[in-house]
Image (cartoon, rainbow, N blue to C red):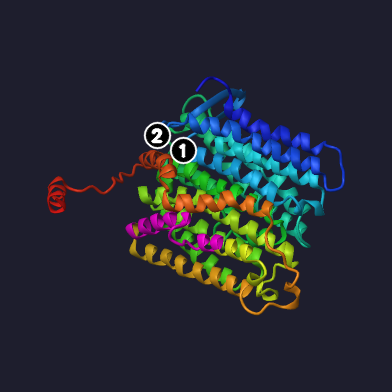
Amino acid sequence: MNDFPWLTTLILVPLVGAVVTAFLPSRPGAPLAKQVGVAFALLALVPAVVVALDFSAGGGFQAEEKHEWIGAFGASYAVGVDGLGLLMVLLTVVLIPIVMLASWRDSDEGNTRAFFAWTLALEAMSLAVFTATDVFFFYVVFEATLIPAYFLIGGFGRAGRGRAATKFLIYQLAGGLVMLGSVIGLYVVSANQGTPSYLLEDLAGLDIAGDTQKWLFVGFFVAFAIKAPMFPVHTWLADTTEKATTGTSVLLVCILDKIGTFGMLRFCLGLLPDASQWATPVVVVLALISIVYGALVAIGQDDILRLIGLTSLSHFGLIVLGIFVFSSQGGSGAILYMVNHGIATAALFLVAGFLIRRRGTSLISQMGGIEKRAPVLAGLFLITGLAACGLPGLSPFVSEMLVIIAAFGHAWWAGAVAVTAIVLSAVYILWMYQRTFTGPAGPEIETFRDLDRREVGTLAPLILALVLFGFYPMPLLDIINPNVETTLTQVGVTDEAPTVPAADHDVAEGAHQ
């Protein structure tokens, strides 16, 4: 790749788009703001695709840019992508224009310019987080994501959204404050061992004492557990998804929350390997509680959006479990699940939003019989719901199987608890579908209309990805596996893939012939 700053361009495109959109003329429906917002979101695909096409799997950080920022304490503007970062970047730039198109009419209920501008701002900050290779720069943009997220939650959605936005902000700021202690701690450690630096490549070479590692780990992990989210710091999640627009919920759950598990891989395992192994028993238990608790609570929900939000608590439990079992299968499954969860849950949220907009309520108890009037809507809802519960042939299934197999390899009881996620997810998804779409249709359903071409077109890329990566996940795994191998090496874990002994292989070949 040439020296052109593609990653900086990637961050600046949506950021400039946010400013331009915010200052467009205010008119009813603001069609110009929508068009300009979508145009900038699509334009951000260009540098992302260029970086992806030039990316070499297993080559470490690529497309790197480094510039001194605050020399007094070793902070730099430094960006780059490895396999993990690249997949999160691609997930972000693909989901943003889809969310904008899906929210084309929902945004009319408030300040349309503000909705599209804040969405672009959130995209820019998220891309900066996923590409940051300097811890201080990461912390700054990590906190900056809260600004557009707060206004998207509090400014658009249903009654009670202001309280939900405040609760979200308090939780996230508390996590950020705890993480700041660890960020400062890294500076002290690096300064004591030479020149202070926040660059990941410099920090990875530090000799950090065991007790110091543990304290630093706790600071990072608490912040990332809130962001992910995990039990017991998850209570902001359901309130937010219930009160915000479905487009905002996609941005939070499918993009912003990935920062939590991304940070665990990048900083907890990457910089603090001994402390990560020390904390594994507690983290695994918390992950298993998240898996079961999230699914059980979801079963009892009457609000569709709250239910979908709680399912993500269960899914993030599986992701964290895959990370902390320290195996190639677990790590690959966790990162693959981060991508597949983003695709499947985004589709489920969006199709639920189309349903709620038509029905005028999000309460399952007030629905029923809709499949008779809207078979396309019902069919797509069922497909996305089955993807969320890991139906074979759809992409989340591969992720779940890798994590569950790795969990059994870690400890039989961990695998036994994790596998309950499959049964429980089938219960809450199928029961929700049955109560919502089947049964007798009331008189209010007579005027119910099916999805239009714009809405089907919005969902089509996500459905295609669910099927494509369900049958052929190797394009993603080819990027993920070298990254997982590098991470396990940093943690000091040797995890070789199963091999067939030569003698057995010869016997098998002879039998085949």
Other-residue count near label 2 (Cα within 10 Å), few / some / many at <14 / 14–19 / ≥20: some
Left or right for 496, reference 46: left
Front-lying residue, 214 or 383: 383
Asked if residue 235 is positioned above or below residue 440 in the image, the reply reads above
Residue 265: x %, y % from top left: 47, 44
Task: Check residue 403 for magenta coloring.
Answer: yes
- Foreground of the two, 341 or 161: 341
Q: Which residue is mark 2?
A: 58
View extreme (bottom): residue: 440
Q: Which residue is mark 1?
A: 83
Name the amino acid, label 1: Gly
Secondary structure beneath dot 1 equals helix
Q: Is residue 416 left or right of residue 386?
A: left
Q: Position of residue 217 (x, y in %)?
A: 49, 46
For the residues labelled 1 and 2, the Cα–Cα distance comes to: 8 Å
Tags 1 and 2 in contact by the CB under 8 Å rule? yes
Residue 108, horizontal then vertical, whole percent: 80, 52
Identified by mark 2, the residue type is Gly
Q: Main secondary structure of the magenta part?
A: helix
Mark 1 vs mark 2: which is more N-terminal? 2
Residue 62 among magenta residues: no
Residue 28 visible in the snapshot: yes
In this view of the protein, which residue sits in the foreground, 99 or 140? 99
Secondary structure found at label 2: loop
Range of magenta residues? 383-409
Look at the image and tell me whether residue 75 can be seen. Answer: no
Q: Position of residue 106 (x, y in %)?
A: 75, 54
Q: Residue, x 54% and y 38% (percent of image)?
A: 185
Which residue occupies 46% across, 28% down?
193
Mark number displayed over residue 282: none
